[in-house]
């Protein structure tokens, strides 16, 4: 029982580690079109990458500080919302990250085929 | 939505002041959107329980706020193993032995109330441990913040790394034989002393004799010498027991320290604030000269025993370390101490 818990905890940690990098790529890719936090979360969840608000907003702030996103407060439906979109630098980095992602994927495919 | 305001207020408290407004506005917008969506789905306003479920899923205020802060650590993963090593060496291998060997005996032995002196030493030890741990932590915290500036981990030379240790060697047979021979000679010397006091007192044996306290300690001393001989015999017959010499040395050191401690304790328990002598004067024509000489010899023996205690304590610490190293070598998953050896 304890072994099972430890094993599932280990899996959860590894899963989160694997997901962390992918989430950044997914967020950058989604923000090729302008969105605010809540719709971005919904869009990611609809595509199978659910992310909670406690993770998404700090990530958005970090990416903005790094110059990959730009944001703007605007009123929509009588409420102030912060809209994010990819900056030119973000577009360039996203392209590089996607190339890297494809390389990793191809390598993994080859490794898995060898086994 | 009082519950939402309370939740946001709690999150705000833990946020960096400069970003509070911005973060709370964005988080509030998200939570309000979630509430509205749920209300639209149910076709009615949410009750407190349903609202609570949304905020609970979002996480505790302090946890939510912590995600907006940059990750900070007092001592990072690069310095932490060195910090841990220094802490262990200073607290366990320096402070504790110093208290057991020097500070403790210095407070306890001459004290009239031994238990109160023991408590005093115990509390002084803890104070010293806390202060040392605090100072070390402070130094490493400063190092953590300045390491990038001084490029602590960038400057290193492959050739300055420690060499790979040679395979464990068995102790030299000649050395063991010599130690055995000298051990046997020492044992016979000790056995002969009661009959020939000259062997220990030299020419002073004419007017000095061992004090009665030796009757209690003579047998333990003989047994210790005998144990030393037995240790050498086992080392000679079982050279493949590479763990044995260091363990035997540590045990012998410990037992010798116990005997020495007992002797010093008895010596300090003299009447009228004085101390029990190790030698006493025999009847001589010049008692004044004999008494003076007795006092000098007693002081010399006292100093020798205290020095031996100190020397053995240091040896004990080194031998304990050797024993731990032996155990580590025999542990299949022993940690690689390469990093520590780089220090």
Image (spheres, rainbow, N blue to C red):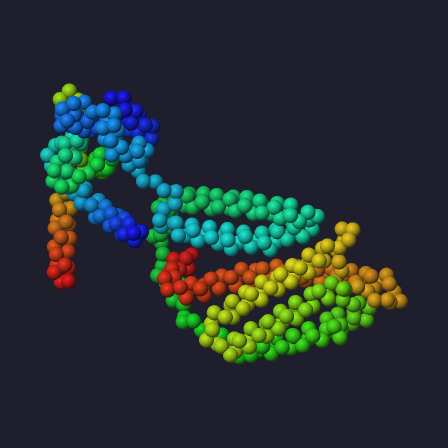
Give the residue drawn at x 86%, y 61%. B288
- Furthest residue toward front: A1
Rendered position, B164 above or below B339: below
Residue A1 vs B338, above or below: the answer is above
Say whether residue B268 is visible: yes
Task: Give residue B111's position: percent from left, percent from top.
Answer: 69, 49
Question: From where the camera sits, is residue B29 visible?
Answer: no
Which of the two residues, B91 or B328, is positioned nearer the viewer here? B328
Residue A22, horizontal then vertical, whole percent: 18, 45
Q: Nearer the viewer, residue B254 or B215?
A: B215
B341 sits left or right of B118 in the view = left
Q: Position of residue A4 (x, y in %)?
A: 27, 52
On the image, which quarter does residue B194 sit in?
Answer: bottom right
Towards the viewer: B342 or B228: B228
Q: Residue at x 40, y 64 (%)?
A: B331
* In the displayed structure image, the side of residue B94 where residue B162 appears, left or right: left
Name the residue at the right extreme: B285
Number of callouts in the render?
Answer: 0
**Can you give x and y, in whole percent of width and height, for residue B326 in the image?**
45, 65
Could you say which quadrant of the image residue B281 lies in? bottom right
> Is B99 placed above or below A24 here?
below
Quarter of the view holding residue B304? bottom right
Q: Residue furthest left?
A: A33
Residue at 30%, 38% in the rendered image: B70
In the rendered image, the quadrant that contains the C terminus of chain A is bottom left
Placement of A109 over or under B232, stated as above or below: above
């Amino acid at each position: 029982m304890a072994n099972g818990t430890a094993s599932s905890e280990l899996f959860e940690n590894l899963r989160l580690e694997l997901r962390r990098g992918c989430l950044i790529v997914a967020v950058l890719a989604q923000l090729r079109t302008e969105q605010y936090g809540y719709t971005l979360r919904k869009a990611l969840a609809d595509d199978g990458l659910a992310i909670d608000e406690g993770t998404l907003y700090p990530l958005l702030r970090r990416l903005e500080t790094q110059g990959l996103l730009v944001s703007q407060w605007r009123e929509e439906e009588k409420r102030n919302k912060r809209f994010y979109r990819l900056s030119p630098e973000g577009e360039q980095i996203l392209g590089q990250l996607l190339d890297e992602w494809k390389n990793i994927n191809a390598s993994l495919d080859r490794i898995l085929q060898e086994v | 939505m009082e519950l939402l305001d309370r939740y946001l207020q709690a999150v705000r408290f833990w946020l960096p002041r400069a970003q509070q407004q911005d973060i709370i506005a964005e988080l509030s917008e998200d939570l309000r959107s979630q509430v509205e969506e749920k209300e639209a789905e149910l076709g009615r306003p949410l009750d407190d329980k349903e609202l609570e479920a949304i905020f609970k899923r979002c996480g505790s205020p302090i946890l939510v706020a912590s995600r907006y802060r940059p990750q900070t650590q007092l001592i990072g993963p690069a310095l932490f193993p060195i910090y841990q090593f220094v802490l262990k060496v200073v607290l366990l291998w320096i402070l504790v032995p110093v208290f057991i060997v020097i500070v403790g005996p210095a407070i306890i032995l001459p004290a009239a109330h031994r238990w109160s002196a023991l408590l005093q030493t115990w509390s002084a030890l803890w104070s010293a441990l806390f202060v040392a741990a605090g100072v070390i932590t402070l130094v490493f915290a400063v190092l953590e913040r300045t390491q990038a500036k001084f490029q602590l981990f960038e400057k290193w030379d492959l050739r300055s790394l420690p060499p790979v240790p040679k395979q464990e060697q068995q102790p030299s047979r000649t050395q063991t034989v010599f130690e055995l021979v000298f051990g046997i000679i020492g044992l016979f010397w000790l056995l002969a002393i009661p009959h020939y006091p000259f062997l220990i007192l030299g020419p002073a044996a004419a007017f000095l004799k061992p004090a009665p306290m030796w009757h209690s300690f003579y047998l333990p001393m003989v047994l210790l010498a005998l144990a030393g001989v037995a240790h050498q015999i086992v080392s000679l017959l079982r050279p493949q027991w590479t763990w044995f010499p260091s363990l035997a040395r540590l045990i012998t050191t410990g037992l010798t320290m116990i005997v020495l401690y007992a002797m010093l304790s008895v010596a300090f328990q003299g009447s009228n604030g004085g101390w029990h002598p190790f030698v006493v004067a025999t009847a001589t024509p010049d008692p004044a000269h004999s008494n003076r000489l007795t006092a000098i010899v007693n002081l010399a023996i006292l100093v020798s025993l205290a020095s031996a205690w100190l020397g053995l304590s240091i040896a004990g610490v080194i031998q304990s370390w050797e024993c731990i190293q032996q155990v580590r070598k025999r542990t299949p998953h022993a940690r690689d101490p390469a990093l520590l050896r780089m220090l």
